Amino acid sequence: MNSFDPTAADRFTFGLWTVGNSGRDPFGEPVRARISPIEIVAKLAECGAHGVNLHDDDLVPPGSSAAQRDAIVAAFKKALADHGLVVPMATVNLFTHPIFKDGAFTANDPTVRAFALQKTMGAIELGVDLGAKIFVFWGGREGCETDACRDPRTAIVRMRESLDWLCDWTRDRGFDLKFALEAKPNEPRGDLYLPTTGHMLHFITTLAHPEMVGVNPEVAHETMAGLSFVHGVAQAMEAKKLFHVDLNAQRIGRFDQDLRFGSEDLRQAFLLVRLLEGTGGGVKYDGPLHFDAHAYRTEDDAGVWEFARGCMRTYKILAERARAFDADREVAALIAEQRSTVIDPLLAGYSRPKATLLRALSIDAAAQAQRGLRYERLDQLMIEHLLGVR
């Protein structure tokens, strides 16, 4: 084992749906046989993962009897115990069944909204039974192809009512659980409601129990919209709302690719890991590091586990590179904040005396504008650290 080989201490997790992906796409049939949840647990443990996450339907097939459910869950729990894995997060599939063709919590038909709540209650119970402390909501069908079908404000109200209902039900049951909302701009609907992490963060402030709701940003989803994933995660961290994170890779302007972490845009991947690890001096994220990605369609079973190991190794390599970058004295000098014992106190909180002193400051804007900030050198140093030559 070398320093980049993953271990359980790294907090890396995968979903049953990620390594279990059969390679099927809209234009082709599966290229790999289904891997059972029990097999996935064993192989993830062998690869050095910490945990496994799941949708309700990933583990318990829809339509299973109570006895069948109990037998499946018992076997899965045994596999977890045998291999030392945990279930940090669970979620619910409210997008595959045809009943959700017009959405789940936002659907126009109240019967559909009731079914969505029923299904989510069962998924929450399953997650809690398996030890999950985080429950993610991805509204894959919460959107539209034509806004003529409903007022978008109505959709937001319905989403709020559903989450408030589920928060109250979860509290009433005494479950130790937090909710994390996952944004996406489009696909499979033409437009999805609450399409970015920023939208979700504001929406959370309108809920009845905002303290138990955070976000689960995904690299691909923010990148699809052409946004900086690093900035979205930073906003969530600053708001103390980063409850979970989905790591993968994505090219701007493409369909949701869910590529191996770090396989596209290494610069952004590096900056993301630097942010999460807190090597630049910020607070470190200490929650699960979940890879919501899947192997190329070209791969057989062996390739799936190579993909899984690759996700984890790339993260660890980037974390080492981030530590080296932030330990570099020249880097530290270039990003050192300029401080003024005169000006800084005037900017920290308003008061009338401060306003008077601020207005009286003599600032040479032309001279200040001519100062070079040496960000070209800083960026080059980052690239050299990323390439391993410094």
Image (spheres, grey):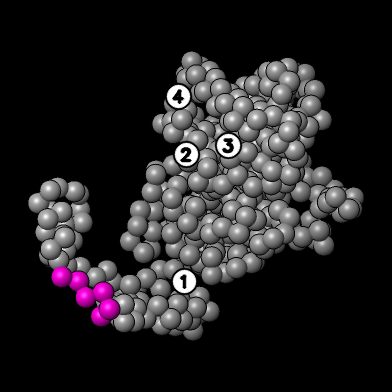
Q: How many marks?
A: 4
Numbered tag placed on residue 208 in the rendering: 4
Circle 4 or circle 1, nearest the eye: 4
Label 4 and label 2: CA atoms lie apart by 13 Å
Q: Where does label 2 land, which residue?
A: 202
Specify the segment rendered in magenta: 362-367
Q: Where does label 1 land, which residue?
A: 321
Circle 2 or circle 1, nearest the eye: 2
**Residue neighbourhood size for the residue with mark 2, other residues' Cα within 10 Å, grouped as few (<14), some (14–19), many (≥20):** few
**Vertically, is 5 above or below 109?**
below
Q: Is residue 139 left or right of residue 1?
A: right
N-term mark: 4 or 1: 4
Coordinates of residue 178 in the picture (x, y in percent): 49, 32
Q: Where does label 3 land, which residue?
A: 136
Label 3 and label 4: CA atoms lie apart by 18 Å
Are circles 2 and 1 on residues that touch, CB within 8 Å?
no
N-term mark: 3 or 4: 3
Dot 2 amino acid type: His
Dot 4 amino acid type: Ala
Circle 4 or circle 2, nearest the eye: 2
N-term mark: 4 or 2: 2
